[in-house]
């Protein structure tokens, strides 16, 4: 399907596209199908699976991705969400990723998603073409270790630049999705609360729908929903089947929304986020994917990776059980 920036859609067309895209995502993504296949292993008190984003254990004694996978499996996580630069580092040091894939497979962990920052959203056509090449390389790397999804945040957004219409962003996300079809890796549209373009649930929901692609999906983040001023009630508008994973965290009551940043994220249950309401709503909309703990707390980084990883899953599981109890 060809998208042009002059193509204007009626509300009825966008809504129709929304219904089709979100419904199709329920069956199109391998990650979602995998989640359903493992549903029997979950219980009413714990209807989700748990994932560790490697930023959470970015401690002084930096582990390589193989050790991170081993640690995540050891403490009880079902999935791991690494950053693409970790794969690049591993490749530079060891070469082929086949051994890494075997180590990850042997650990029993699943690589749920990967974090990368190609500037796919920029207005400049040449820069955008270069960004798609960067995305292609990242997708190739993650596919080599069995990962089928990669994050697509508003990378390339200029803080003081002109606003980019959401319809244009939808066309660019569609191009990313088409690239993903070729590479076997689905880019997930990520919410960034500090973004002027994709800072609210309404923004990413519109773009994901208007992209009109059967694998269109959204990556939400509890902290970023708060930072961007989204109402947590907005979650009930979405389909859980188009949410392969949710970045899970908590935040304190101070500093306020305007000045808080990523470093203030805390373990789930240690802040003031309405986790019970959020988790209940996720369950009610059919989400049965991964809660991926993503923190950037410098206090935690001073502690041992195992201590932080263990606290991450224990506190997340406790928050889920409290919400479902």
Image (cartoon, rainbow, N blue to C red):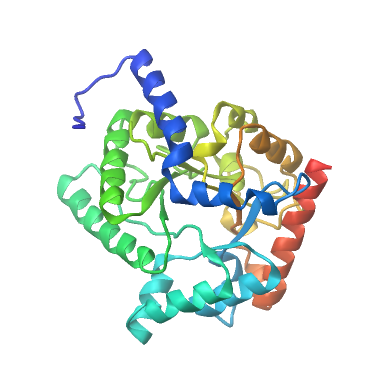
Q: Quadrant of residue 161?
A: top left
Query: Which x, y percent locates residue 162?
Result: 30, 36
Rendered view: 201 above or below 116: above
Q: Position of residue 282 (x, y in %)?
A: 64, 37
Relative to residue 322, is residue 59 drawn left or right? left
Residue at 37% of width from left, 13% of height from top?
A: 12
Residue shown at 51% from the left, 34% from the top? 201
Closer to the camera, 310 or 232? Answer: 310
Image-based side of 151 in relation to 109, left or right: left
Side (left or right) of 275 relative to 35 = right
Question: Residue 89's image quarter?
Answer: bottom left
Image label count? 0
From the viewer's side, name the closer residue of 158 and 214.
214
> Does residue 297 appear to the left or right of 22 in the view shown?
right
Residue placed farthest to the left in the image? 126
| Image vertical order of residue 97 relative to residue 52, above or below | below
- Vertical arrangement, residue 186 with respect to residue 83, above or below: above
Q: Quadrant of the C terminus?
A: top right
Q: Is residue 19 visible?
A: yes
Q: The N terminus lies in which quarter of the figure?
A: top left
Question: Is residue 63 at all visible to an observer of this figure?
Answer: no
Which residue appears at 29% of the width and 18% of the height? 9
Query: From this viewpoint, which residue is outermost toward the bottom?
Result: 94
């Amino acid at each position: 399907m060809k998208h042009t920036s002059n193509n204007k859609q009626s509300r009825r067309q966008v809504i129709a596209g929304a219904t089709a895209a979100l419904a199709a995502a329920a069956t199109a993504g391998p990650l979602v199908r995998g989640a359903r296949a493992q549903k029997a292993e979950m219980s009413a008190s714990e209807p989700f699976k748990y994932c560790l984003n490697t930023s959470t254990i970015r401690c002084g004694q930096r582990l390589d991705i193989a050790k991170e996978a081993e640690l995540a499996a050891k403490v009880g996580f079902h999935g791991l969400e690494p950053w693409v630069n970790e794969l690049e580092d591993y490749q530079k040091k060891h070469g082929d990723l086949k051994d890494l894939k075997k180590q990850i497979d042997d650990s029993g962990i699943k690589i749920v998603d990967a974090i990368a920052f190609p500037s796919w959203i920029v207005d400049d056509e040449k820069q955008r073409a270069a960004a798609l090449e960067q995305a292609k390389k990242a997708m190739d790397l993650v596919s080599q270790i069995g990962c089928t999804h990669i994050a697509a945040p508003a990378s390339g957004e200029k803080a003081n630049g002109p606003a980019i219409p959401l319809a244009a962003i939808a066309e660019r996300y569609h191009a990313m999705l088409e690239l993903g079809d070729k590479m076997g890796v689905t880019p997930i549209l990520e919410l960034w609360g500090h973004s002027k373009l994709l800072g609210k649930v309404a923004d990413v929901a519109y773009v994901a729908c208007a992209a009109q692609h059967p694998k269109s999906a959204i990556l939400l983040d509890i902290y970023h929903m708060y930072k961007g001023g989204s109402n947590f009630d907005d979650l009930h508008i979405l389909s859980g089947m188009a949410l392969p994973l949710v970045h899970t965290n908590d935040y304190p009551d101070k500093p306020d929304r305007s000045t808080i940043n990523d470093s203030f994220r805390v373990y789930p249950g240690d802040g003031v986020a309405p986790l019970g309401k959020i988790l209940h709503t996720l369950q009610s909309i059919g989400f049965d994917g991964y809660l991926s703990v993503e923190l950037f707390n410098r206090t935690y980084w001073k502690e041992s990776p195992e201590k932080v990883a263990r606290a991450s899953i224990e506190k997340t599981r406790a928050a889920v059980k409290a919400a479902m109890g």
